[in-house]
Image: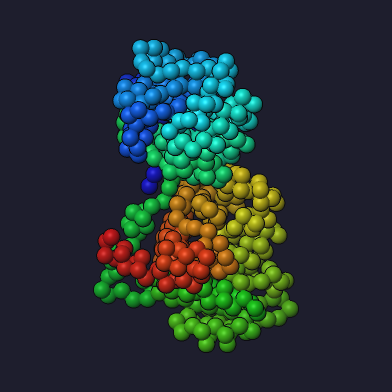
Amino acid sequence: MKKVLNREQIRELERRAAAEGTGYAALMENAGRAAARVLIKKQEISGKRIAFVCGKGNNGGDGFVAARYLAERGAKATVILAEGLPTADPARQAFAALRDTTVRICLYGEEPAFASQVLVSSDAIFDAAYGVGFHGALSEQVAAIFQTVNQSRAYTIAMDLPSGVDCDTGAAAPGAVQADCTVTFSTLKPCHLLYPAKERCGEVIIAPVGIPGDLIEKQSHSLLVLDAAFCQTLFSPRRADANKGDFGGVLCFCGSYGMAGAAAMAASAALRCGAGLVHLAVPESIYPILAAKMDEPVFTVLGENAEGFSFPPEVWTRATACLAGCGLGRSTRAGMLVRRILAESRVPVILDADGINEAAEDISMLQTARAPVILTPHPGEMARLMKSTIPDIQANRPQRAAELARETGAVVVLKGAGTLITSPEGELYYTPTGNPGMARGGSGDVLAGMIAAFTAQGFPPVVAAACGAYLHGLAGDRCAARLSQTAMLPTDLLRELPALFSEFEAGR
């Protein structure tokens, strides 16, 4: 899995590299050359007009190195100083090295018209104005430069990150650079994954700049990007003498009148993901529908009385995970059922949809749950849980997910573009799979069933959640490729799962 470092972590990593002999000047030289080589791989540069928008800090120094490197290889390079001469020591050294080269220098403050003409007529533009330290708003002068960059037809490469985006939060100032490609140095940063900054990055390429791999390995990180290898290691061949009890039991309290489909999709996903037994505890009103539709689950019909839904205690007997909420509906009975499940369950509880909405009414029921809890909210449900707003959640996704996990003691799966999974201990995973075709009712029911199945089979809650989210998105991507984002349905995800597990079993 790829590490993602925030601004303080990347600065700490660079300090450690400098202490071990890889100084800032060497890192700058390697960064500038690495970004330049990306352009060389993408297009012929000899005789081409290439502009470099450089700031006063070390990000500008990376741009100076790239300009020198490409000029030595025949490019017509022009450096545009966006806010004056460099002030950081390594950047000043890199700027001084331009004296005996063919690189032209333009101070934007003195020649704005000329600088704009350079940008408009360039074949490629390197954005080296701001690095990881940027936050806040753009000055009027810099905003004017970036407007010209964004209107240009030139291929634009951002060095480390697009200028005008916040490294840690993914916020983008109005007028931030829109890059075709971002060359990030050493590791990914949060802004390469979080919206709206992610949309400004274009293609993201990670370039090593000479920091030893063991230092990166030891460095604390902001989050980890999930990959197929992570999931592959979790699935070993089944023993020849295995029986259904070896693969756990999922007890599902899902569905209500009018929403039987949610229970069916969740249960089907749990079955497709290897659970040995799936037990559906459902209201009498939907039992005939589900019993006619599904052959594999065991059913318990929930009784209804003044105290809510009733069920015999033996339903817990073979359960190793409990899923509650998919299509459960909002009612007094549903609320009492969720409270009872959280109070009585001795096995991990996956709480989805209406189960989350019920818990949002009294979050203490999560804090006092007797077993581990996994929450799978979409942004609206997350906002209700945190008594916040959807814009606030979306603007601070990692921070809000971590806060809720700490507050409730639950694993939190914050769904959406780039689903995030976090544990109360602070583990944070990012899901790179998935697409907008999955944004429709039912997709979350499938995800909840998948996570329940993995939990039932003994995966630690945060691992079950991370694996479920990654594979759910991967199945969605395959559906989109086969059926289109417009036409794909949540039930199509279920049909992709067998092929995915076949590949795992074959070791691919």
Q: Position of residue 11 (x, y in %)?
A: 46, 28
Q: Is residue 14 left or right of residue 46?
A: right
Give percent across and percent down for residue 370. 56, 61
Image height of 427 relative to 437, above or below = above
Residue found at x 38% / y 30%: 48
Number of marks drawn = 0
- Pinpoint residue 356: horizontal percent, then vertical percent: 63, 62
Q: Quadrant of residue 33?
A: top left
- Dividing the image into 4 quarters, which one contains the C terminus? bottom left
For the residue pair 159 and 50, the one nearer the viewer reads as 50
Residue 283 falls in which quadrant of the image? Answer: bottom right
Position of 225 relative to 110 (above/below): below
For the question of whether residue 476 can be seen, the reply is yes
- Could you say where residue 408 lies in the image, as x and y percent from the top left? 60, 52
The colour scheme is: rainbow
Residue nearest the viewer, comparing 161 with 501: 161
| Residue at image point 57% right, 28% down | 145
Task: Examine the rendering and report whether any part of residue 448 can be seen.
Answer: no
> Does residue 123 sit above or below 444 in this rendering?
above
Q: Residue at x 69, y 70 (%)?
A: 330
In front of the other: 363 or 288: 288
- The residue lying at 41 percent from left, 67 percent from top is 482
Q: Is residue 80 above or below residue 348?
A: above
